[in-house]
Amino acid sequence: MANISIDNAHGINGPENIFLRNRAELFGILMSPINPSNGQIFIGNDITNTASGKGNFGIYGTGQ
C-alpha cells in the first residue's frame, strides 16, 4: 500500500475504524483536517519511506 488516507470525500469515515499492521510504503498516513473522522485507532502500522517529503503522517480529530 502506498499510503493510508482517511478523507471526507464521501462523508465522514468512522468513527472507530481500526488500522492494524499496515505498511505505508510511500507517503505515510494522511487524515483530512477538514471535518476529520474522530476516534480512529492506529496499531502497529509501518511507515517505511524516509525520502524527503515522504514517510510522514498527519492525523487530525479528537477522541481517545
Image (cartoon, rainbow, N blue to C red):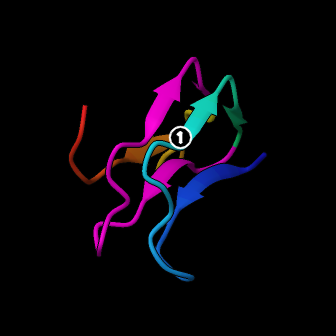
Secondary element under disc 1, as helix, strand or loop, is: loop
Residue matched to label 1: 55
Image location (x, y in percent) of residue 43: 53, 21
Magenta region: 26-47
Image location (x, y in percent) of residue 48: 64, 29
Magenta highlight on residue 28:
yes
Residue sitting at the far top: 44
Image location (x, y in percent) of residue 59: 34, 48
Image location (x, y in percent) of residue 57: 42, 44
Q: Which of the 4 image quarters holds residue 41? A: top left
| Kind of residue at badge 1 | Gly
* Residue positioned 71% across, 39% down in the render: 25
Q: Is residue 62 left or right of residue 12?
A: left
Q: Quadrant of the N terminus?
A: top right
* Residue positioned 44% across, 70% down in the render: 12
Instruction: State the residue in front, 14 or 24.
Output: 14
Classed neighbour count for the residue bearing mark 1: other residues with Cα under 10 Å, few (<14), some (14–19), many (≥20)? some
Magenta highlight on residue 11:
no
* Residue positioned 71% across, 31% down in the render: 23
Q: Is residue 49 left or right of residue 6?
A: right
Q: Quadrant of the C terminus?
A: top left
Residue sitting at the far left: 62
How many labels, in total? 1
Q: Is residue 29 left or right of residue 34?
A: right
Q: Indicate whether 56 appears above or below 61.
A: above
Q: Indicate whether 63 appears above or below 6.
A: above
Instruction: State the residue in front, 17 or 52.
Output: 17
